[in-house]
Every structure is written in C-alpha cells, then in structure tokens.
Amino acid sequence: MATLAVQKITTAGIIPTYYAAASAGDLVANPGGETFLYLKNTGGSAAVITATATTPCDYGTYHSLSYSVSATTGEAIIALSKRLNTGANVVLSYTGAVSSLTLAVLEYAGTL
C-alpha cells in the first residue's frame, strides 16, 4: 500500500503527476477534506475505486464512496469527504482494471 503525494493546485494552475493504482490499495492524505482524485482508466474493462466511511453524517449514516471509472478512455474527478478519513488519511481499494488505472491526488485549499 503506497502513500500518494498530494499536489497543491494554485491559481497559476497545475500539470498533475499521475500514480499507478496499487493492487493492494493506496493511502491519500485528506486532513482538511479538500482533496480530490483525478482518475484515468486505459484498460479494456471498468475499474472501481472504493473508500469506506469511518465517520457517520449528522443522521448517523455512513456514506462510503464507490465509483466506477469506465473502460478505455474513462476519466473521473472525485472529491474526498473528511468522513472517509482513517486518522487524516483515506484508504483506497480497487477492483477491475487496476493495472490500467492511474490517479493524481490534488488539493485546493484557497478561494477562487
């Protein structure tokens, strides 16, 4: 399980660095709940990313994240809630075309 570096988005913009998804899963820092994942799938089948919520919402429900990135040219941007944090990190797991899935971890803590 790799810990992926968070890349800060500035008002000048960013050219993100992408990491290969690890079949054993990855850790992403998300202390302020301002982290996004930019996912790309070049494989012949869909890839599913999952993060399990560890904190319930105000109504007591756990809102875990599971998102399918479509095959071949699938792309997605996902916001990570603080409710997904284990400590200050989000634990990600993957199924499907994991070997063809790449992701960039982005954070924008400023205002537009």
Image (cartoon, rainbow, N blue to C red):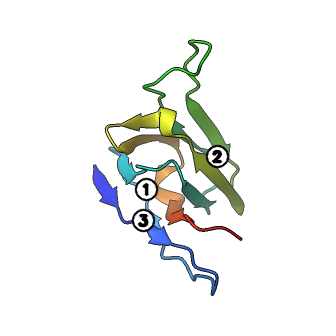
Give the label, 3 or 1, closer to the camera.
3
Q: Position of residue 24 (x, y in %)?
A: 32, 44
- Give the residue drawn at x 64%, y 46%: 46
Q: Name the amino acid type tagged 1.
A: Ala
Per the image, the residue denoted by label 1 is 21
Between 17 and 96, the one nearer to me in the picture: 17
Residue linked to disc 2: 46
Are the residues tagged 3 and 1 within 8 Å (C-beta)? no
Q: Residue at x 58, y 79 (%)?
A: 10
Nearer mark to the viewer, of 1 and 2: 1
Vertical comparison of 102 with 80: above or below:
below
Crowd band around label 3 with a 10 angstrom C-alpha radius: few (<14), some (14–19), many (20+): some
Q: Residue 6's mark? A: 3
Q: Point out the frontmost of discs 2 and 3.
A: 3
Quadrant that contains the C terminus: bottom right
Q: Is residue 77 left or right of residue 1?
A: right
Cα–Cα span, label 1 and label 2: 14 Å
Q: In percent of the image, x 58 and y 22: which residue is there?
A: 57
**Tag 1–tag 2 contact (CB < 8 Å):** no
Q: What distance separates the C-alpha of mark 2 from that of mark 3?
A: 25 Å
* Image coordinates for residue 1, horizontal then vertical, percent: 28, 49
